[in-house]
Amino acid sequence: MKQKLTFIFTIFFLLMSSLDSKPKRELRILIDAEADSNFELELWQEKPSETEASIAPKPPEVIQFKGNRITVTPKDDFEYFRVRRLGEYGAKGFWTQVFSTNVEPGSPLSVPKEFVAKKTFEPKPVPKKVVSVISNDSFVIVKEKEEGTRYLTKNTINVAPTDDASGIAEVRYRVNDGQWNSAKSLASIPFTEEGEYKLLYFSIDMAGNKEPIQILDFIRDTTPPESKVEWVGPSAKGKGNVNFLSPSSKIRFISKDNRSGLKDIYYSTTCQSGTQSEFKVFTTDLSLVDLKMECKGSFQIFYYAIDQVGNEEAVKTLNFQLGSESN
């Protein structure tokens, strides 16, 4: 069901000072909604389909704005537009029907210039509406190039609806292409398996008022990174697959994560019969010369990695036996 929004459109044709220039179109859109609402406006050259499955071949010009009114100047070949509401956490409402940008002044879709100049619009009292809220602390945003991807950091999502009038009757939700589910008042939805998800949800109050469908896209990452050691400098394999390193060799930790990406690699050292050091972030290759100065005999290095959503790798151990200078 399409989201119902009430619009009042005004187009003024302003003559430019030059006789050779074309008149500039001015499209004023007034939406019957809260003054702090967020919307997305699309201007099209060719009329898009009323369904989401098929759109016009030429891409639209997209404008996002805050508030219940906007004034735009469409380019000459942009003949159509539509609007949809934007909710919290990336939720998006349904598009309105497609309107023409060439609305004639005085038509049922426009406001006469005199009325706009003299009449002051007084906002109507906004009735209490059903609103469903998802806690923001359940997600982290991971930057990938210029865009951010939402990752769920918990095993469940709680949809908590509020209604100051008649109270909440039920919450309805659907995950990906699954069936619609119903829950009373508070919906706790499990997401234990790794993967990409699209959650659709809305609430209904005791009076039968339905909240517009909210859409939330996110990824669940449950797999920790995988780290390994890379030797920098001279090295050789001996009996029993033992690595023999020169004093000038260095140790490098590298890690791979296939979902949210690597955040940090940590390491700690323990000299023979000594106390283990605190874990610290690996930033530069570790010098065997420095380690030999610190530890006179055998020693161990412990290391692990953590990804952007907090998945920690199991701690791994690297054992060393330092030889004498004559070796």
Image (cartoon, rainbow, N blue to C red):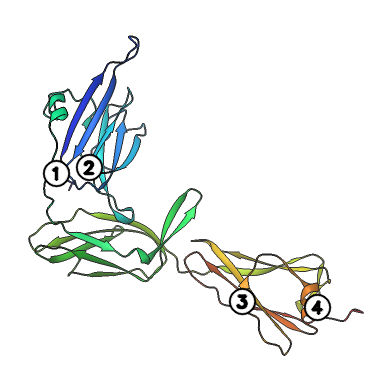
In primary-sequence order, the first of circles 2 and 3 is 2
Against 137, residue 5 (above or below) is above
The amino acid marked with disc number 3 is Phe
Residue 54 visible in image = no
Residue 1, position as x, y percentages in the image: 17, 48
The amino acid marked with disc number 2 is Asn
Identify residue for label 4. 293
**Crowding near pointer 2: few (<14 within 10 Å), some, many (20+)?**
some
Identify residue for label 3. 279
Image-quadrant location for residue 209: bottom left
Q: Residue furthest bottom?
A: 273
Image-quadrant location for residue 55: top left
Identify residue for label 1. 123
Q: CA distance from mark 1 to mark 3?
A: 59 Å
Which label was assigned to residue 291?
none
In primary-sequence order, the first of circles 4 and 3 is 3
Against 271, residue 246 (above or below) is above
The amino acid marked with disc number 1 is Pro
Q: CA distance from mark 4 to mark 2?
A: 69 Å
- Helix, strand or loop at label 2? It is loop
**Crowding near pointer 4: few (<14 within 10 Å), some, many (20+)?**
few
Residue 309 visible in image = yes
